[in-house]
Every structure is written in structure tokens, then in C-alpha cells.
Image (spheres, helix red, strand yellow):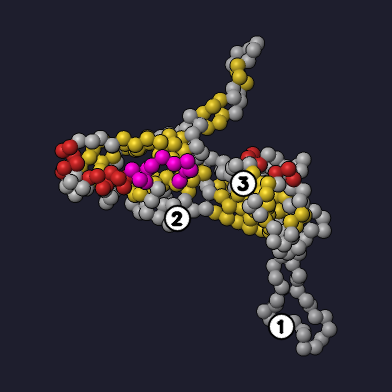
């Protein structure tokens, strides 16, 4: 089941396979930290001999999301079953899972988070009648960005000319016939990636062989990823720009193959709007099977 499959109505919240909100046993009244900007660490430094400061980078801190006023309903004397189900879905864990929230008729957004605190008031009367009010859930997302559910992808091959039209200059049975056949279309080696959000997105870049010295350039920003490596036909070089890793066939690190032209992997991003990216390789490396693909989600603060 994909993240967000359970979310169908405004007010739905999905986490760990559990759905909260309308027409579920778990209602909620408010959510904080979802539409708020995350906290920041500022690199701004005060000027030593003048007014003001030198502006530095602003780096977002983890996002904390709290569901308040959670109401749990069950059949009379069956509240423990509903509480155990909630506890199981929000148990402490080391990895982050999708937290999907839909506030209105707009598409829902997701972040990857862990539940770090769960508060469930215990009152004998509430358990007896099947209503517990005033519960709360708190989540922490190490990546403060929120993402669209649909992961986009694009792929391109190395630049390749079109074969063009064979004019059959000699008269005979092979003279031109309509409709004209111009052959298979060529490739420009360029692909367009669109980030509809308001935060920079980190794409997952995949190079497939056979190719030598594969590179991808973001024409919009000028950033380049290039690796001094030769990939065989079955090889795949995976560049995770979010985590800053480069792996060959998902096992061996090849981060050291980055050339002097290559930027640090985690600085290669897709800013909001559309960007054109070009796939290139070493001179003479023009096998039509070589490819470069990108996967990303539009990102939002």
C-alpha cells in the first residue's frame, strides 16, 4: 500500500497504516507545526566594526507536528482495543515513515516522521462508555520539508542524431512512399524537471551504462554531477543527492570518483519551478543504451 492511499477526505491523517479523522475511531481538533515554518539555524555573523551583520545561510531544523484534541471512540467497554491499535501504529521506532495530512480539498502532503510522544488520558468513565477525549500525538520529521504524494520521474539518453529520411534517389520500387518514414527520433540528451513546490527538492539520479564519464548538468543553476567511472551495460550508478551518497549497483560506494567539476552531491537540487538538465559522457561514449534518470517529489516548506 502506497503512502496516502487511505487518505480520501479533508481532515484525514495517515501514519503507520493507521487512519485518523472523519469516519474513523480517531478524531482530532487541531494540528500545530504543519503549516508553520520550521525553526532555523542561522549562519549570520555580526560585523566587527560596523552596524549590522554578514548574512549567513539559514538551515531548517527538524519539523515537529502535534495533533491535539484527539478523541478516541469505541463500543462500550472496548476502548482498550482502540487504544492498543493506536499505540501499535505510533510505537517508538528508529526509522521514519510517511505522515500524510489532508486539510481540505487540495491534494494532501507528506513528510517522513516518527511519533515521539503519545498522551492518552485514562478515565474509568471514558473507557466504560467508549469515549476518550484530550489525547495527543507528537511527531518529529528530521527533514522539515513536506512533499507531494506523487513521485515524478524523467529519463533521457545521450545526444543522438536522427537517421533522417532516405530519399531513394534512384527511381524504382523503393521510390518515396507516403506517409514518409523519417526513422526513429533522435535524442537531445536533455530532460526537464519541474518542482511545483516552494522548497528545493533533492533528486535521486541514476546513470545506466554502457557509458564512460557520465555527467548531468542543471542548466538553470549551473551545478554539475560528473563521475570518472566506466559503467558496463548492466551497471547502475545511483546518486542520492539528499544523503550525499554515490553507489555502484546499490552496494559499493563510488563517491571518490567525483571529478573536480562535480559539486557536492547534497548541493545538487531542483529549485522551485522548471529546470533543464543535460546528460553527457566522455567523447566516443555514445551507446544508445546509456541513460540518465531522475526521481523527485515537489517540496514545500
Task: Looking at the image, tell me whether mark 1 or mark 3 is earlier in sequence order.
Answer: 1
Which residue lies at the image location 63% right of the left edge and 58% below the top edge?
155
User: Residue 157 versus residue 239: which sits nearer the camera?
Assistant: 239
Q: Secondary structure at mark 3?
A: strand
In this rendering, the answer to whether 143 lies above or below 251 is: above
The stretch in magenta equals 87-97
Which residue lies at the image location 22% right of the left edge and 40% below the top edge?
132
Asked if residue 136 lies in the magenta stretch, the reply is no
Task: Looking at the image, tell me whether mark 3 or mark 2 is earlier in sequence order.
Answer: 2
Cα–Cα gap, marks 3 and 2: 21 Å
Which mark, residue 240? 3
Which residue lies at the image location 17% right of the left edge and 37% below the top edge?
124
In the rendered structure, the answer to whether residue 273 lies left or right of residue 93 reads right
Q: Can you tell which quarter of the image residue 44 is in?
A: top right
Cα–Cα gap, marks 2 and 1: 50 Å
**Residue 191, image x, y percentages:** 65, 55
The furthest residue to the right: 170
**Residue 180, image x, y percentages:** 70, 77
Residue under numbered circle 2: 2
Classify the position of the N terminus by image quarter: bottom left
Which residue lies at the image location 77% right of the left edge and 61% below the top edge?
286
- Viewer-nearest of labels 1 and 3? 3
Residue 3, can we see it? yes
**Residue 187, image x, y percentages:** 70, 62
In the rendered structure, the answer to whether residue 196 lies left or right of residue 73 reads right
Q: Mark 1: few, some, or many residues within 10 Å (few <14, many ≥20)?
A: few
- Viewer-nearest of labels 2 and 1? 2
Residue under numbered circle 1: 177
Amino acid at each position: 500500500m502506497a503512502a496516502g492511499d487511505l487518505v480520501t477526505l479533508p481532515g484525514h491523517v495517515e501514519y503507520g497504516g493507521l487512519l485518523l479523522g472523519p469516519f474513523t475511531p480517531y478524531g482530532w481538533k487541531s494540528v500545530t507545526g504543519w503549516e508553520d515554518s520550521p525553526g532555523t539555524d542561522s549562519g549570520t555573523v555580526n560585523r566587527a566594526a560596523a552596524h549590522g551583520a554578514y548574512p549567513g545561510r539559514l538551515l531548517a531544523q527538524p519539523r515537529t507536528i502535534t495533533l491535539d484534541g484527539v478523541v478516541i471512540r469505541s463500543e462500550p467497554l472496548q476502548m482498550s482495543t482502540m487504544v492498543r491499535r493506536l499505540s501499535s501504529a505510533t510505537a517508538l521506532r528508529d526509522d521514519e515513515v510517511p505522515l500524510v495530512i489532508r486539510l481540505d480539498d487540495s491534494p494532501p502532503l507528506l513528510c517522513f516522521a516518527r511519533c515521539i510522544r503519545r498522551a492518552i488520558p485514562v478515565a474509568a468513565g471514558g473507557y466504560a462508555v467508549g469515549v476518550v477525549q484530550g489525547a495527543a500525538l507528537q511527531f518529529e520529521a528530521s527533514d522539515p520539508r513536506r512533499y507531494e504524494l506523487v513521485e515524478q520521474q524523467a529519463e533521457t539518453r545521450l545526444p543522438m542524431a536522427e537517421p533522417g529520411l532516405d530519399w531513394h534517389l534512384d527511381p524504382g520500387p523503393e521510390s518515396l512512399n507516403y506517409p514518409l518514414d523519417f526513422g526513429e527520433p533522435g535524442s537531445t540528451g536533455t530532460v526537464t524537471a519541474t518542482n511545483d513546490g516552494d522548497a528545493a527538492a533533492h533528486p535521486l539520479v541514476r546513470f545506466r551504462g554502457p557509458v564512460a564519464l557520465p555527467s548531468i548538468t542543471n542548466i538553470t543553476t549551473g551545478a554539475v554531477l560528473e563521475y570518472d567511472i566506466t559503467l558496463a551495460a548492466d551497471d547502475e550508478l545511483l546518486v542520492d543527492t539528499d544523503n550525499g551518497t554515490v553507489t555502484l549497483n546499490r552496494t559499493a560506494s563510488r563517491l571518490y570518483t567525483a571529478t573536480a567539476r562535480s559539486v557536492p552531491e547534497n548541493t545538487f537540487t531542483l529549485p522551485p519551478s522548471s529546470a533543464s538538465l543535460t546528460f553527457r559522457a566522455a567523447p566516443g561514449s555514445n551507446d544508445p543504451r546509456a541513460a540518465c534518470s531522475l526521481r523527485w517529489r515537489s517540496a514545500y516548506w
